[in-house]
Image (cartoon, rainbow, N blue to C red):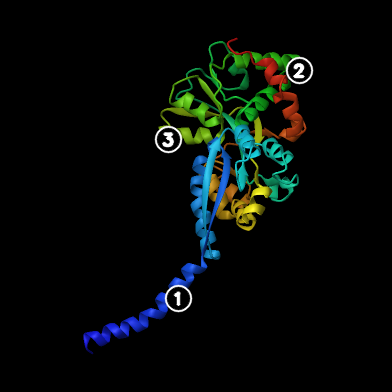
Amino acid sequence: MPLAAQLTRRGVLALPAIAATMRAARARSRVELMNVSYDPTRELYRRINPAFSAVQGRATDVDATIRMSHGGSGAQARSVIDGLDADIVTLALAHDIDAIAASGRIARTWQSRLPDNASPYTSTIVFLVRAGNPKKVETWDDLTRRDIQVITPNPKTSGGARWNFLAAYAWALDQAVGNEARAKAFMQRLFRNVPVLDTGARGATLSFTKRGLGDVLLAWENEAFLAIKEDGAGAYEIVVPPVSILAEPPVAIVDEVVDRRGTRAIAHAYLEFLYTSEGQEICARNYYRPRQAEVAASFAKLFPKLSLFTIDERFGGWARAHDAFFADGAIFDQVYQPGG
């Protein structure tokens, strides 16, 4: 067959396929979501986002792009209240999302719209110490010794810092057999050992790992694992206290934004992805404790067992805990004496 005829034949055969491809390309839509999150989730969502986009792209005609914003959980919540157009918030504690709900941007029923009170993964608070644990830090009591410096962020701006504070306070209250004055005195001694209060958990981690401050970092478990992964087991080790708090970081759709932008369906699919087996495995690989029993079982060796209490059990939930401990003039303000 002459070359011209071959080209014509090939062109005729190719045109329908090209046209179909062009129609498919035109049929696909692009959606951009913004996830406003807290400091230590940077690595987690760096892996969640492309995995979700791939699943969504295969299942629908939508190509999803997710932008991220990270910072201290309390500060992030205030940014959303002040108008930052987040489609989704994935913050450190329920009180921060409740604060956004009080502003009218999120429905007050947000926590009932997803399983496990809208907390698809959990964590806890552990001690990160330098290799060999030279100061022999083992329990919460050790954090009040005069030879110890403790790194923890500011509870006024950091959700992780609030979990830190309440875990330590519950321990102190138990040792004091419920005597609140003695528990407050314990916290005063602890915070006298805190040389700097960073605004977020990641900043506190960097103060400990990069600036060399402190003997022990009060850290999210996932943040402690990540520090060891990045700098090597020869630099740090994790000390698991005998008792700690079950940290349940929640997630929610920002109703006012998704309804205005028309992104509710895909934003909901994004949060639902966190509960799938694939999403749960990504959470576990990034050192968050998965909720799904099968995934949790396959990662059981990674996460040490310890006695955990919940915020509801010990403090009556986040609304009461915030008012008692972190509102202006509350217990944190009473025990923390800058420069003291």
Tell me if label 1 and label 2 are in contact, CB under 8 Å: no
Mark 3 / mark 2, whichever is N-terminal = 2
Q: CA distance from mark 1 to mark 3?
A: 47 Å
Q: Position of residue 33 (x, y in %)?
A: 56, 51
Compared to 213, does 123 lie above or below?
below
Q: Quadrant of residue 200?
A: top right
Q: Which class describes the residues within 10 Å of circle 1: few (<14), some (14-19), or many (20+)?
A: few
Mark 1 / mark 2, whichever is N-terminal = 1
Residue at left 63%, top 56%?
A: 262
Report the residue marked by disc 3: 230
Residue at left 51%, top 68%?
A: 27
Residue nearest the viewer, comparing 325 with 327: 327
Q: Which class describes the residues within 10 Å of circle 2: few (<14), some (14-19), or many (20+)?
A: some
Compared to 93, does 175 lie above or below?
above
Residue at left 76%, top 19%?
A: 177
What amino acid type should be assigned to the residue bearing mark 3?
A: Glu
Compared to 11, does 117 lie above or below?
above
Identify the image quadrant of the N terminus.
bottom left
Q: CA distance from mark 3 to mark 2?
A: 40 Å
Residue nearest the viewer, comparing 12 with 191: 12
Looking at the image, can residue 32 be seen? Answer: yes
Report the residue marked by disc 1: 20
Q: Quadrant of residue 31?
A: bottom right
Tell me if label 1 and label 3 are in contact, CB under 8 Å: no
Residue at left 58%, top 54%?
A: 277
Q: Position of residue 184 (x, y in %)?
A: 71, 16
Report the residue marked by disc 2: 180
Q: CA distance from mark 1 to mark 2?
A: 72 Å
Under circle 1, the secondary element is helix
Under circle 3, the secondary element is helix
What amino acid type should be assigned to the residue bearing mark 2?
A: Glu
Number of marks: 3
